[in-house]
Image: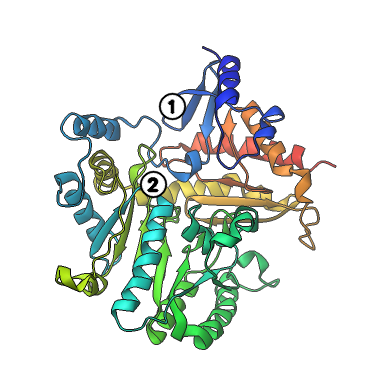
Amino acid sequence: MDNASLKKRDLAVLWHPCSQMKDYERYPMTPIKRGDGVYLEDFDGNRYIDAVSSWWVNLFGHSNPTIANAMKEQVDKLEHVIFAGFTHEPAIDLAEQLVAMTPEGLDRVFYGENGSSAVEIALKMSVHYWQLAGKPDKTKFIALESGYHGETTGALAVSDLGLYKAPYKSLMFNVMTAPSPDCFYREEGESWHDYSLRQFEKMRALVEREHENVAAIIVEPLVQCASGMRMYHPVYLSELRKLCDQYDVHLIADEIAVGFGRTGTLFACEQANISPDFMCVSKGLTAGFLPLSAMLTKETIFQAFYDDYEKLTAFLHSHSYTGYATGCAVAKATLDIFQSQPIIENNKVLAQHMAQATAHFADHSNIAEVRQTGMILAAEMVQDKKTRTPYDWKERRGMRVYEYSLSQGALLRPLGNVVYFMPPYVITPEEIDKLADIAWQGIQLATKD
């Protein structure tokens, strides 16, 4: 078994996600044989530092033995059981731990199978709640410009990335879009805090005008990941929570990508000292081992659905693998690591080292900004630094970084022209230095005319 034979077999039968399949003629895929810590190894013996945590899911390294053992022990006892009318200890244990770890007031847990599923659950539950509360006109949603919440129809409807969304517009409900607080666009000398507040006034005006018809506002707290790791100040969330309370609108926090320590706190909402009405978590929940998501909400929302069967108020959303026992056991083992080890404190040290290792990136003539929130760091390549004129997207400068990094032993998969680090938390300072050097050299090559 080698890379070449597996590539050939793959291309004969598979259709890969987020890919123009013809691209694989120009950018061949990399078959992976095994993972160990921050490293991936292919069938030809090459090793790669997984700088993007395999699409942001891996927290504690590939093949983490603690989590792997929890998974093995669970499948020997109970792999899965229908979750309507039945329950099991892993689901209960995990729910209790999630309630204890998340912001105060999130007291009920509804399980899903992936991040998009959690978003769908929150959207449906919000609209359904307002019907039960005697406000059936509250059926609309407000989302942020450049936001991303998943690929299922409802989740995509509240997203704002045209390339992903445009072909399926006819399938979706209409959503109101508020300008993003993305601080990349702040004026020279303007702080993240002040720009985020300035952008918030546009959200305020929209809510004041439309609140009677709005069920919920959905945001990615602090970092809009898929749009290029665009970041904003926690004050935006603080003000948004007050606005939602004032006008009786739900706040949905999509912490799928930013939760579980990515932003420097266990959950991004903590930095604004807020508790949303719905919180969606996935990705790092199982540290990259299994698909699982959870949607947490408030007891008051749960109670609106709680009534006699004949009242027909039950929330009937379901998935075959809701409450997946093996996934819950894996997630519990993941959360236990946070409780038994000083992960957040250690991440602060690693985040500071990432900042130091990439500080010189800001001096590059084609890097408009180096931005960081916790364990997420991004450098944005542009054609003209002074005007921040972007490169023509057809030039695919980011792919030049991707190709070079693979040749040097690193998986750096840029978002367009944004090169970013979101590594597993077991990465060492030395490995960060290596990534920074590879990224720098890749950017040098990518920005040559």
Q: Residues within 10 Å of mark 2 (few under 14, many from 20)?
A: many
Residue sitting nearer the eye, 417 or 442: 417
Residue at the front extreme of this rendering: 310
Earlier-in-chain disc, 1 versus 2: 1
State the residue position of label 2: 284
In this figure, which colouring scheme has been used for the structure? rainbow
Residue sitting nearer the eye, 8 or 261: 8
Q: In the displayed structure, would residue 219 be above or below residue 85?
A: below
Residue sitting nearer the eye, 297 or 374: 297
Q: Residue 212 location, x and y as percent? A: 44, 86
Q: Say what amino acid the circle numbered 1 marks.
A: Gly
Secondary structure beneath label 2: helix
Q: Looking at the figure, which quarter contains the C terminus?
A: top right
The quadrant where residue 427 appears: top left
* Residue at 37% over, 42% down: 291
Cβ atoms under marks 1 and 2 closer than 8 Å: no
Q: In the displayed structure, would residue 107 be above or below residue 356?
A: below
State the residue position of label 1: 35
Compared across the picture, whether 325 is left or right of 114 comes to left
Q: Confirm whether residue 267 shows in the render.
A: no
Q: Confirm whether residue 13 shows in the render.
A: yes
Q: In the displayed structure, would residue 421 be above or below residue 385?
A: above
Q: Gap between marks 1 and 2, in whole Å?
A: 17 Å
Residue at the top extreme of this rendering: 1
* Residue at 22% over, 59% down: 100
* Residue at 36% over, 51% down: 345
Q: Residue 445 location, x and y as percent? A: 76, 37
Q: Say what amino acid the circle numbered 2 marks.
A: Gly
Compared across the picture, whether 308 is left or right of 345 comes to left
